Amino acid sequence: MSQPTPKALAVLPTWVDSSLLKGMLRGIERESLRMQSNGFLSQADHPAALGSALTHPHITTDYSEALMEFITPPKASIPEALNFLADIHAVVHAQLENGEKLWPLSMPCMLDDNEENIRLAQYGSSNIGKFKTLYRRGLGVRYGRRMQTISGVHYNISFPDHLFEQLQQHESDDALKALNLQDYRSHRYLGLVRNFIRLTPLVVYLIGSSPSVCRCFMTGREHQLLPLVKGTLHLPYATALRMGSFGYQNSAQKQLGIHYNNLKCYVAELQKAVHTPYPPFTHLGLNDAQGEPVQINDHVLQIENEYYSLVRPKQVPKAGETPSQALANRGIGYVELRAVDVNPYNPVGIDETTAAFLEVLALYCLLKDSPELLEPEQDLLDLNHAEVVNRGRAPNAKILAADGETALIEWVQTHVTAMQELAELLNQTYDTELYSQALVLMQNRITDVDATLSAQVISDTLEHGGTWSFGSFMAQQHADVYASHPLSSDVQTYFDHAAQQSLQQQQQLEQDESISFEQYLADFR
């Protein structure tokens, strides 16, 4: 199939200038397991000195008690976001006990044969705290607890309203011109979401870094992985097994028919899934033999956040709102790019070139034409996704489209070339060379497959003699960086105060309870 001409991919309108991007915001969420000094998953409680995982704004836990999550506030530049993330890591490292370290890979450290030793995250005795733990117990019952030890990076990004105002003024469609700003912004963000889904194979190839996994992760599961070195399994050309069938998957969700073509339908479809029973989950039961609840409900989704997706449209919920209610009430405020592996070579799991690349890509997805995403195209995209996850570094890796197939490398090259002018625009906005430098680095990974992160991980895993040895080596390197990271007295005071305040907030929630958890759960059900 012949390649589209660069002109066909040009997405930057002539009237757009760098001032329209001033006011962009980005925030980062990074997950990391706590690992014992012997290489196994930590069995210890979340460090008390870090505050309450339930109410702390920046330091919490995700699925398992040992899976920490670090959250930056929205920041005006990439360096500010990464600096805040580095501060969090230094604060956390200082409170880890008994030789624990932060595991640097997306796929987990050593797990023993007993899944019950993957402790569910604990959030105290308030009803909301118990509810959060029950949700995780439900995930364990439905998908197995091993899946709850996988780490990722979520990159949150928003564009300023004045950009949307200008885009709307230049629309030729009268119906789009007639929308209020909230609805127009949501319309454009959904276009970004659809294009990001189309371009996820590009993300997986360029920054995927989970091509192999500790053998222990696959205990009790059928798989087609091959031995790489003792104790480590892989696929020869894999890029990001975290993003494939061994990572977060939910066969029930495939049948949901959740689309990103308009916000009203997306919200309705998501809410329907939370209220639709699913026979295999009904079969698991709501309570165990002792009468203790094991899942919130038997629905396709227990709660909306159970919907696993490559990218999410988001709005900050107010008290009492679900994520979909926040979207319905105030429209899309930002997007969460979720198809990002933890970079094991960077102490905070993501470097500035990856961050810059994701921002160029997000702008590209926003400005590029984005037709509705319907089932026939989605079926092709699923095949492309599996191809790049499992064999993206293969010389004959292909991308399928309705009009034929293209070599993966040519397809990636076409899009990265089309992003160059957007990188220049972002350079002008921030008075930096970072964005174009990021594309130079990505270009190197297109030209030389051995320069990809996934190829480097395989090489270093072999050199160190296995996943655990490689991960432990990098964990120690990173620990040294955290230990030497300078924390100003203001920053230290801020985090000390946040920890104290979070503990007080949790205590207040626990004191204010007026009904039993049984009643709370019955009301929710």
Image (cartoon, rainbow, N blue to C red):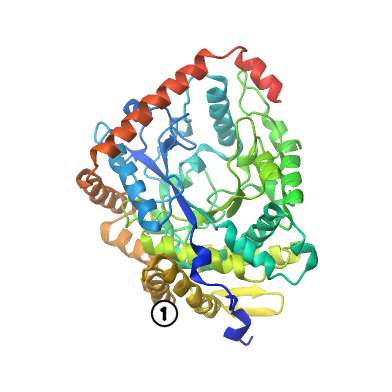
Task: From this view, report whether residue 398 is shown above or below residue 95.
Answer: below
Res. 181 visible in picture: yes
Task: From this view, report whether residue 478 is shown above or below residue 441.
Answer: above
**Which of the two residues, 449 or 163, is positioned nearer the viewer here?**
163
Q: Which quadrant of the figure has residue 285?
A: top right
Residue 7, position as x, y percentages in the image: 60, 85
Judged left or right of residue 347, residue 219 is right
Residue 396, position as x, y percentages in the image: 53, 78
**Which of the two residues, 112 or 269, is positioned nearer the viewer here?**
269
Q: Secondary structure at mark 1?
A: helix
Q: Label 1: how many residues lie within 10 Å, few (<14), some (14-19) or many (20+)?
A: few
Residue 222, position as x, y percentages in the image: 55, 50
Residue 113, position as x, y percentages in the image: 43, 37
- Quadrant in which the N terminus appears: bottom right
Res. 388 visible in picture: no
Q: Which quadrant of the figure has residue 482?
A: top left
Q: Which quadrant of the figure has residue 58?
A: top left
- Quadrant in which the C terminus appears: top right
Residue name at image x 53 percent, y 80 percent: 410
Kind of residue at badge 1: Thr
Residue pointed to by mark 1: 447
Q: How many marks?
A: 1
Residue name at image x 34 percent, y 65 percent: 456
Residue name at image x 58 percent, y 63 percent: 163
**Which of the two residues, 345 or 265, is positioned nearer the viewer here?**
265
